[in-house]
Image (cartoon, rainbow, N blue to C red):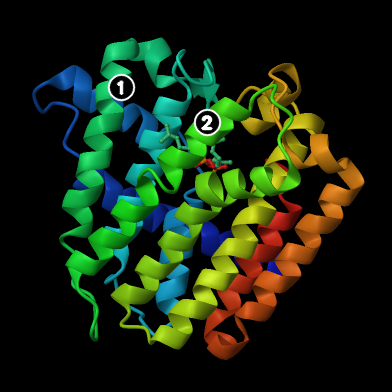
C-alpha cells in the first residue's frame, strides 16, 4: 500500500476503534435524563477527527503497548476535548453556531443543557481515566492527576481566560505562545503522556513525548489559525474568519501568513526530532505530525 493510503487506512481504523469504545462508554441516549445524554452523545459523535485519542493510542504503541490498555485514557481525553468545545461555543464565550459541521450543542439543546452536557463529559472523563490499568510503575491515580492538571486553571481553563482577555488587546508574541501552549498543546501533550503511562513508559520516553506534544501542539494551533483565514466554514465544519472579526491575536495576525507557515514547519521538524529515542515504534507519531502540518481542515 502507498504510504499516504496506508496512513488514511490507519487513521480510519483508529477512528472506528475509538468510536466503538466511546459508544459503549457513554451513557445510552435512552438513559434518564434523556435530553442530557442525547446532548452529550450529539457532540461526541458529531464527527471530530479524534486526534487526541489517536495520539494517545499511538504514544502507547510507541512505548511498546499493542493492546487496548490505553483506550480508557484515549476516550477520557476525547471527553475533555468535547466538553471544552461545547463550552467554548456558548454565547458567553466564542458564541458559535457551527461545530464539526453541525449546529453547536446549545443551538440544538439550549444553553443550560449544553453547559450541563459539558460538565457531565468532564466528570465522565475522570470516571474513565480511573478505570485505567497502566503497566509498570504508573497508576490510574497519577494518570487522573495529569488529566486534572491539564484541564484546570493553569492550562485549558487558564488558556481560555487569557484568550478571552486578549481579544482586541494586542497581545505580544510571548503571551500568544502561552495561550497556544495552554489551550491547545497541553491537551495534546497530555494525550500522549497518558498513552505512554498506560504502556508503562520510562521517564526518558515520557520526556521525549512531552517535547513532541509541545512542538506539535503549537504547530497544530498555528495551522488552525491559518486555516481560519484560508478555508471556508463548509470545509472546516466550524465558522471560518472569526479570528479577524473578533480581533483575536493569532500567529498569522502577529507574524503574517508566510512566517506562520515556516514556523509551523520548523516546530513540526523539532517535534519529529524529539521522537528519536523512541526509534521505529514511533513511526505513526511521525506520520501524524506530518499530516497535521499539511491538513486542510
Ligand atoms: C475549558 C471552555 C474551555 C475551553 C478550553 C480547548 C479550548 C479551551 C477551547 C476550544 C476551542 C479551541 C479553538 C481550541 C483550540 C484547540 C483546537 C484547534 C481545537 C479543535 O480541535 P480539532 O481540530 O477538533 O481536533 P475536532 O472537532 O476535529 O475534534
Q: Depth-wise, is mark 2 or mark 1 nearer the camera?
A: 1
> Mark 2 vs ligand 1: CB under 8 Å?
yes
Residue 110 sits above or below residue 190 on the image: above
Total labels drawn: 2
Most extreme residue toward the right, as rendered?
A: 258
Between residue 44 and residue 118, name the one nearer to us. Answer: 118
Q: Nearer the viewer, residue 256 or 282?
A: 256
Mark 2 lies on a secondary structure that is loop
**Eyeballing the image, is 76 above or below 43?**
below
- How far across and how far down the image is residue 133, in percent? 18, 72
Secondary structure state at the residue bearing disc 1:
helix
Name, please, the residue furthest toward the left: 32
Where is residue 146, by image quadrant? Answer: bottom left
Task: Give the x, y percent position of residue 216.
Answer: 63, 61
Q: Earlier in the sequence, mark 2 or mark 1?
A: 2
Looking at the image, can residue 24 be seen? no
Residue at 35% over, 44% down: 80
Q: On residue 100, which mark appears?
A: 2
Q: Which residue is mark 1?
A: 115
Q: Is residue 294 left or right of residue 61?
A: right
Give the residue at x 54% y 87%.
278
Q: 262 or 75: nearer the eye?
A: 262
Residue 55: image x %, image y %?
Answer: 48, 63
Q: Residue at x 68, y 18 (%)?
A: 246
How many C-alpha atoms fall within 10 Å of the one at disc 1: few (<14), some, or many (≥20)? Answer: some
Amino acid at each position: 500500500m502507498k504510504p499516504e493510503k496506508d496512513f488514511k487506512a490507519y487513521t480510519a481504523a483508529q477512528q472506528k476503534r475509538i468510536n466503538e469504545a466511546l459508544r459503549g462508554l457513554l451513557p445510552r441516549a435512552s438513559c434518564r435524563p434523556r435530553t442530557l445524554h442525547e446532548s452529550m452523545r450529539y457532540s461526541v459523535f458529531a464527527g471530530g477527527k479524534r486526534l487526541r485519542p489517536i495520539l494517545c493510542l499511538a504514544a502507547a504503541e510507541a512505548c511498546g503497548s499493542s493492546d487496548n490498555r490505553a483506550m480508557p485514557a484515549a476516550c477520557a481525553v476525547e471527553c475533555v476535548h468535547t466538553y471544552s468545545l461545547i463550552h467554548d461555543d456558548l454565547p458567553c464565550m466564542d458564541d458559535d453556531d457551527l461545530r464539526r459541521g453541525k449546529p453547536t450543542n446549545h443551538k440544538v439543546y439550549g444553553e443550560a443543557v449544553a453547559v450541563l452536557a459539558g460538565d457531565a463529559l468532564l466528570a465522565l472523563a475522570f470516571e474513565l481515566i480511573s478505570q485505567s490499568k497502566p503497566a509498570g510503575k504508573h497508576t490510574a491515580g497519577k494518570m487522573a492527576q495529569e488529566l486534572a492538571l491539564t484541564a484546570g486553571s493553569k492550562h485549558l481553563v487558564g488558556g481560555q481566560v487569557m484568550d478571552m482577555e486578549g481579544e482586541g488587546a494586542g497581545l505580544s508574541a510571548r503571551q500568544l505562545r502561552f495561550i497556544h501552549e495552554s489551550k491547545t498543546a497541553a491537551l495534546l501533550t497530555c494525550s500522549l503522556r497518558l498513552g505512554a503511562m498506560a504502556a508503562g513508559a520510562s521517564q526518558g520516553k515520557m520526556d521525549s513525548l512531552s517535547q513532541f506534544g509541545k512542538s506539535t501542539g503549537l504547530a497544530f494551533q498555528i495551522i488552525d489559525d491559518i486555516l481560519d483565514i484560508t478555508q471556508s466554514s463548509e470545509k472546516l465544519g466550524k465558522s471560518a474568519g472569526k479570528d479577524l472579526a473578533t480581533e483575536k491575536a493569532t500567529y498569522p495576525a502577529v507574524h503574517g501568513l508566510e512566517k506562520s507557515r515556516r514556523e509551523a514547519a520548523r516546530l513540526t521538524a523539532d517535534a519529529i526530532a524529539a521522537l528519536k529515542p523512541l526509534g521505529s515504534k514511533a513511526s505513526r507519531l511521525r506520520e501524524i505530525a506530518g499530516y497535521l502540518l499539511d491538513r486542510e481542515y
